[in-house]
Image: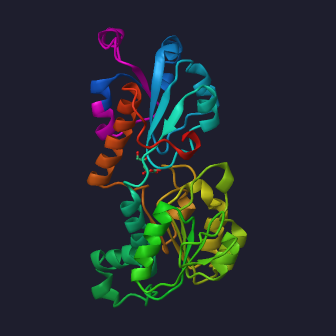
Amino acid sequence: MSQDSRTAAAGKPLVLAVSRLMPLYMGPLAERYEVLDRLHETDPAAFAAAAPRVRAVAASGESKLPAALVAQLSALEIVSVMGVGYDGVDVPACKAKGAVVTHTPDVLNDDVADLALGLMLAAARQLPAADRHVRSGDWAAKGPMPLARKMSGARCGIVGMGRIGKAIATRAAAFGMPIAYTARSAKGDLPYRYFPSAEALAAESDFLVVITPGGAGTKHLIDAKVLRALGKKGILVNVARGSVVDEAALIAALEQGVIGGAGLDVFANEPHVPERLRALPHVVLAPHIGSATTSTRQAMADLALANLAAHFAGQPLKTPVPECR
Ligand code: 8YV
């Protein structure tokens, strides 16, 4: 944004878009606020001058807002994340400044759960390979594909039994799958079997679906031991955060046949996916599209904007993160 347009926008609260935001969020944001679009990355000197006036940060679920950046924002009041996950935001640093953090839970439960089931089916029934088999002419030239794996009735283990975990369980139950889960503690109101560790759960699962928050507390929760417990017929599905799975251990497990396959929507260093992972035929890959439908992303953008509007109108926030309630 030029100096002229910054001046023209004077009077509106100054907002830092901390990473590239979707037009659904960025468009209305720029109409309602004075927005610095990633100025901290593109022009640190100009950013340092403007930083003391920044009252809000707009972010996506993958954005990084470390303590060092928060420290530059002396007037920060609110961080509005368009995403349910906010593991890139240093919440204690924001709170220490008196700033609140909001996110967009619930509106994406269906989409992420739908994608989890899609990845389970795609990995079990080898849908990408099946598609290639037809397109390449191999069907006519070489005959049918090798037989695949049945999903209905297989055991579904869910790592993380929050809102999205429950939505995955409901869908998996409709496939006749017995459901078990691990979480920090057993949830008494659920009819599913609880395991205290991911390793114990994996040993009793045919599909292991990861949908737990990212961040330091869950880093590499799915490691070589858990993958060994899942076993050579087991399928790992990750719709949470790449950080939850030890990606090097996963690649080794897939290459060596320690597990049977995987369906992955998230990766350790997005958008970069290791060549060794991309080379594996029994892995289904998606570019972090869990919530990527038009209606859900619209609902997420609306909620992220509603949190900012409520804050600047002095009204109660719609969806602060649990640490800020
Ligand atoms: C999005 C996500 O990728 O909600 C989350 O935590 O990871 C996603 O839904 C994204 O941040 C949309 O802005």
321 lies left or right of 139? right
Q: Residue at x 37, y 76 (%)?
A: 127
Q: Please provide percent x and percent y for residue 230.
A: 63, 78
Q: Residue at x 27, y 53 (%)?
A: 295
Is 9 magenta? The answer is yes
> Which residue occupies the foreground of this view, 13 or 257?
13
Q: Quadrant of residue 14?
A: top left
Magenta residues, start to end:
1-28
Q: Residue at x 66, y 75 (%)?
A: 195
Is 230 magenta? The answer is no
Q: Please provide percent x and percent y for residue 135.
A: 28, 75
Q: Is residue 63 visible?
A: yes
Asked if residue 232 is positioned above or below residue 47 in the image, the reply reads: below
192 lies left or right of 253? left
Q: Quadrant of residue 109?
A: bottom left
Q: How many circles with numbers are drawn on the protein?
A: 0
Q: Please provide percent x and percent y for residue 272.
A: 51, 50
Q: Quadrant of residue 231?
A: bottom right
Asked if residue 189 is positioned above or below residue 33 in the image, the reply reads: below
Q: Is residue 264 visible?
A: no
68 lies left or right of 43? right
> Which residue occupies the foreground of this view, 224 or 10?
10
319 lies left or right of 259? left
Q: Residue pushed farthest right?
A: 225
